[in-house]
Amino acid sequence: VAVDETEFSEFFASQYAALCWLGLLLTGDRAEAEELAQEALVRTWWRWKLVRRPDDPASYARKVLVNRRRSLLRRAGVEARYLARSRPEDLVVPAGDERALVLWQAVQTLSARQRAVLVLRFHQDLPEAEVARLLGLPLGTVKSLGHRALARLRERLGEPGLDPARSSTEEGP
Amino acid sequence: VKLEDELRQLFGRTEGVPWPGEREAFDRFLHRRARRGRAVATAAGLALVAVLGAAVLVARGQPEDRQTVGPAATPVQVPDEGFQLTVPVGWQVDRKLTGTVSGPLPGGPTGVVGVVLAPATAKPREAAITVRADDSRELWDAASGKGSKRRADGRRYLLRPGTGPREVGQYLLGWPDFCPSGRGSCHRMSASPRVLVVTGVAAPGDAAGRQQVLRRMLRIVGTMKPITDSRRPPAAPTVPANTRVLLGKGGTGRAAWEARIEPVRRTAGFSIHFPWQEQREPGKGWHWESLEAESIQRNGISLFMDCLSWAPGSGLLLSGLAPEEVATVRIELAGRPPVVTPTFARDKPVPWVAFVSPPLPAGSQVDRVVALDAAGSVIGSLEQPYPGALCRPGAIEPP
């Protein structure tokens, strides 16, 4: 694979943190976020010649990351999901106030797909149709997931006594 | 501030923020890339090495294993904390520890929380092993953190050095407890963090004795079995991913529907199709969600909502799945009489029944959805599944 290393290393430097943060928003776990970002960048490097010109390579790397997350979830099954949930949170989204911290904790109680919909909608600013395409779900399902996720967050934020670690909203496979 | 805007702000805080350890990341990337390149060429060799390595490990592990679970070893159960341990040969239960049973809430019931083991012959000198449960998050983090290992069943454990001259060391073994059956507020398949703490002590100068205690501790960690609430509950009944079943049809005209179990991308799900809308706008007249078998088991219902925006005046349609014993589903609406809808699809090859409400007025607010058996007993319920008024007239709600 003949790749302009300088060009790619600049791309790496400009995208690594953003991809890690996207991974963290999707998973809530620092190690998993780094793993996803690294994997996305390796796969982007292997297809660099194809993606650098016609496409936006950053967008390609993001798609790889989301897809990778999706396929890992599908493969891992319930046990891994529970383990992933139980892992310590050693890194949080930079939060300016208590409300933001509470909101971040509430986001982490959402199921993986609900969280993915919110992150792609409100972090990546993707339209619902694009979120549906990226997650491989019907548009109606994405709307419903988003609706439920917001309802769940409202419920959580309205009940400060609840311990988010103690209950969850995991979905099917 | 709208919640959507708050989320944008929260997620937006990551913009331009450096990631910890970013400097070393490119080196890791280069290693990873090189590894990927070598992966195919070395795969066969690695597989062979792995097989040989496993064979050696198994051969080496066998004598130790046999000793551990030999005929003289005694199982002791501590049901309140969900574990069974095997008392090593030559050791016995010295006493049981009582206290507050670990759990999600403080002030839980009192029970047996652990045991203290001691050698039957008083050798090694001053030796004892304490096994107790602890629900400290900090210990859970330590047990599953850096340097931890995994048992064959995937549970993580970690050896920490002892504190003080007598303590030989301390094993932390991740031991989650699962939500008891019938507790609707928690997810049965999710587990709460809890650890078993295995602490050994022996006389400070007795090096051989201390080693012996350490080996016994490791055996205990390796042979501990989950019982009661640390056993994963049986999985909820489900169907193969490729299941395609038409559960039933109903409604008329623009509000006609078909309820199905069908897969999307190799995942089984419940779907509701609206043929009128589907014919008009292909792809936009159906709604699919993955099967939440666990949710059905927990709440007695898995609920879906659709707004019939293409059928003026029709408003909201609630549908879903319930366990086979559910005969009717009662939908309680704010300020309106409840709507009771019978279940159907009992004769279909799936472990549930389905229900679809009649079209409910636009702007309905759902207070509660209750699953009832034929005698009218409650099987499960969902409280305020969708807060607020749903399907406002003139507005298109999801989906």
Image (cartoon, coloured by chain):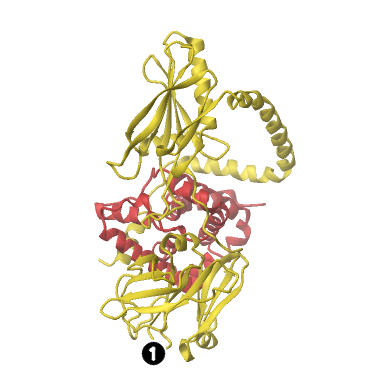
Q: Judge whether residue B324 can be spotted in this image.
A: yes
Q: Is residue B79 above or below residue A135?
A: above
Q: Position of residue A40 (x, y in %)?
A: 55, 53
Q: Which chain is red?
A: A
Q: Which chain is yellow?
A: B
Outermost residue to the bottom: B253
Name the residue rendered at 34%, 83% in the picture: B362
Q: Element type at marker 1?
A: loop
Q: Is residue B160 above or below residue B386?
A: above
Residue denoted by label 1: B312
Q: Position of residue B186 (x, y in %)?
A: 38, 54
* Front-lying residue, B45 or A160: A160
Name the residue rendered at 48%, 91% in the picture: B253
Q: Position of residue B129 (x, y in %)?
A: 44, 22
The quadrant the N terminus of chain B occupies is: bottom left
Q: Judge whether residue A37 can be spotted in this image.
A: no
